[in-house]
Amino acid sequence: MALPPPDPEFVLRGTNAAVHTLHFSCGGQEPDFPILFSGQNGFVHVWNLKTRRVNTALDGHGRKSVYWVETMGAKDRLLSQGRDQRICLWDLTEGRTSVMDSVFTENVGFCRCSLLKVAQGRWLLAMAAKSLEEVQVLELPSKTSVCTLKPEVGAKLGMPMCLKLWQLDSGSRPWLLAGYEDGSVILWNLSMGKVSSQLVCHQEPVMSLDFDSEKAKGISGSSEKVLSIWSLNEQQNLQVHKTHELINSGISDITIRSDKKILATAGWDHRIRIFGWKKLKPLAVLDYHTSTVHCVSFSDHRNPSERLLAAGSKDHRISVWSIYAQT
Amino acid sequence: ASLPGGSDCSVAFVSHVVGKACVHGRQKEILGVLVPQLTELTRSDCIWQRICWRLVEGVPDRWMEAVLLGFVQSASGADALSRLLGNVVVKNKKAQFVMTQKLLLLQYGYTTAVLQNVLGYLSLDNLRRALLIKVLQELLETWGSSSAVRHSPVEQQQYISKAILICLSHLKEPEIESCRQELLTNMMAGVKCHLDSSLPQIRRLGMIVAESLSVKINTDGPVLKFQYEEDDETRELKSLLVRAPPGRDVPSPPHDRNERADAALPGELEGAEKPQTAAQVVPDEESDAELDSDDELVPYDMSEDKELKSTKAPVYIRDCIEVLTTSDDVDKWNATIKALEGLIRKNPAATREVSVELAKILLHVEEKSCIEGFAVLRQKAQVAVLTTDPIPVAQFLTSQFYSLNYSLRQRMDILDVLVLAAQEMSSKFCGKNKQSNAQKPCIQLLPESDSSKDWRKVVDERIKSKTRRFAKGRSQAEPDSGPNEFNSVAGHFFFPLLQNFDRPLSTFDLLGEDHFVLGRLVHTLAILMYLAANAAAVTPMGKVLLEFVWALRFHIDSYVRQGLLSCISSILLSVPAAHLLEDVAELLVETRCWLADVVEKDPDGDCRRLALQNLLLMENLKKKLETAPS
């Protein structure tokens, strides 16, 4: 007899707005300060997971929605992307809350950026650029443009919807996977700035994707009922590996846990689904939220048994779960 | 028994001995020894075969039946029987009568194996095959005769059906071709009688036999296919159509058996091993792949994961009414039907304002789209309306029961709803779990046997509990009870149902063709009577019901009779004994005589059982009254 799905470990309230993005920072030097960053309308909240309260609220986007946050290295360097067309870099050391630097993207879309550390002190940031179909890759912290990825004329891909920078291991060539409005996923070769492979995965816009560079396998979700799993072969070509049909349509976010064992999807049907990554075996359906779940994120705890999963939803709540933490 | 070979001797004496022994009932003893030995000896030796035939043919006619029956029962298989009996059935008139008529049509207590033996025996020789066809035709005539279907016991009908199926399995194409037209005519007639019956087992038997016949007759055209529930009985019947492989003798002499068994085993083992190894190769590959999958991640229960509903159901009862009557929006209609029962129960006051209208709509509403369990949902909603506002809705429903222009299905739905509502309203009083048994909606055509079985269980329980209580006194604590809401409205449910049963309408004739509905009505009345145990109106209800039963007691339909007997049980259990004796003492005595008659003579086993129970109840009643202080 299968057990009923677990309840959340705890639920964070107090955002008073739909939660668009979440990012954990718990693997750092200070084990007593597990932090969760959440982005809502206008603010980035820094949650202390021990006390489960908001430590600080960062107001840097003129009350416009923040739809992506990620730490750059340590937990006191935070990048946030808002609908005010800016990406801000925050300095949070010792209780400060100041914007150190910002990038004006001139992009009015919703595409979340992707950050990749390529060397000590050097990062690559991929973001949707001003022109509708373009993706720009910047090097941080210098903010120099590495390349601009333009699909060929007449490709009719639409806007880029989601991005993922990856490299096989540190020091090797970085690649970019981008999901577009027409349902295709493109693998970009960054050194040449050209399309390496293109695969039509969905009939509807690709809402979110994630990639496992070790297994060269990725997964994408869209506004329809299908999750698409595709893989990269030796010639760096994308092929569809399998598809999985869901009960209700619409996925906002997908994320694979760092141990590559499970993945979580955030659904428009208010539910979070957990799958095994190896064979996409459905493992659990977490039904807590009462509105669309916008984002899911796994924590980076060093101690495996402390690992958590957080989900942010339109119902203003962040649910935090401890699931499959023992394996 | 050893016999010098070659010489011509008479076995007449042996025939006489065997015959006499069999007629005195010693078939098992003497044939138990004789038959296995003869089976062995005749296996390959023609002389022994002829000796055996002479033996059997030499049995005097007056003992022939006993001997044949003994042989048929102790033979190990059709071909053994064939070797033992030879063509005695063709040569001897009495033997023919016994084998083709008596065994098959006049008696029905033998096992399927015996049937297989007899019919297989008939099929094994060309001389005898003509008899096989004749037998099939006669069996079919009986099977198809409507009076047989109505009056003969279920067990006999099962026996005949089995015989038909076995015959069919033995007949070859050309033989069936020759009598195809007759088979077809008989089948059509027979199917009609069977489907008309009120007992589900009969209907099912008819369906299975007709299907089998149709398969054999129309080998290239479309075949008849019925829908019925599969269970052990149906599977057994269908397996009879497949002929058992001939020559499958069970070797009886011990030394032979071992040899044969040894010979058989290696062959079997070989055969069995090969498919096993083949099958094993494939799962290995799969299991390899499985092993390193996420086996350590145990999935949680995901049964709650369903589609998100987008349309909301109306929240007010009046809105529901509007949606059900006028709306074209299928989603909304579906959502309304699903939510209706809950809404009715949560808003009793609002429901009472529109109860009759709602009941009317529910009675007439038809399935607009394919939602699961539409009939169940509708019935639950109807029950909810009835329990919320019993009197006006009961009046409405009972009046509609006898009105023009309703289908039989709708009338039976009315009865079901009345029963379920009555059970619900009196459930706090009755307490126990029989409530849950009957609460399962009686939508399918089959539950009448179920409800009568439950019914019997309940009555049995009650009888036992009553007798025990009499001896030991009240040892059980009474379960928590609430007020029995049914008591005050029992009369409204009950009496109108009895008003017009003898007045036929143009579309509805309870006492005529629609005896199936009559059966359901009678069962309903029995349940209502039982549930009214403490109602104020229980005595007049009992009187009226007793007279009703008396009027219908000779009904030809056994389902109706079962219902009438259940009514008597309810009356005896619910009406206080003193009142019964006061008001209807004479009728009770006459009823008792009738019950005794039923116990002895009724062809239906269930009727006899129920009648016996009723007699027991009456005895208890008498005892109770005699010993109770006046």
Image (cartoon, rainbow, N blue to C red):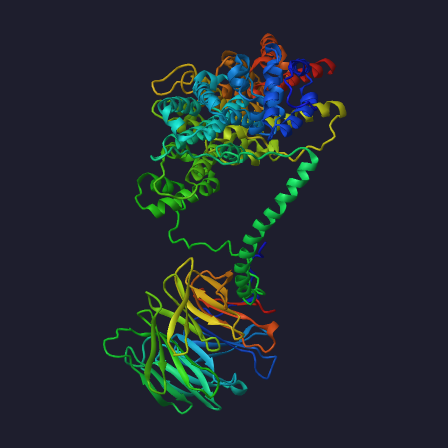
Say which of B611 and B345 sits in front.
B611
Residue at the outermost front position: B6
Circle count: 0
Answer above or below: position of B52 versus A201: above
Quadrant housing residue B405: top left
Residue A277 appears at what percent x and percent y?
Answer: 50, 68
Residue at the outermost left position: A154
Residue B495 appears at what percent x and percent y?
Answer: 48, 20
Residue B189 appears at what percent x and percent y?
Answer: 39, 21
Q: Quadrant of the C terminus of chain B?
A: top right
Residue B323 appears at what percent x and percent y?
Answer: 34, 42
Say which of B291 and A98 sits in front.
B291
Q: Is residue B223 left or right of residue B97?
A: left
Answer above or below: position of B566 versus B224: above
Say which of B44 and B123 sits in front.
B44
Q: Quadrant of the N terminus of chain B?
A: top right
Q: Is residue B320 visible?
A: yes
Please give the name of the residue rendered at 45% of the width and 64% of the height, measured from the top-left corner.
A315
Q: Is residue B574 visible?
A: no
Quadrant housing residue B485: top right
Answer above or below: position of B123 versus A119: above
Please give the name of the residue rendered at 39% of the width and 80% of the height, measured from the top-left corner.
A176
Answer above or below: position of B129 versus B627: below
Say which of B163 and A316 sits in front.
B163
Quadrant housing residue B340: top left
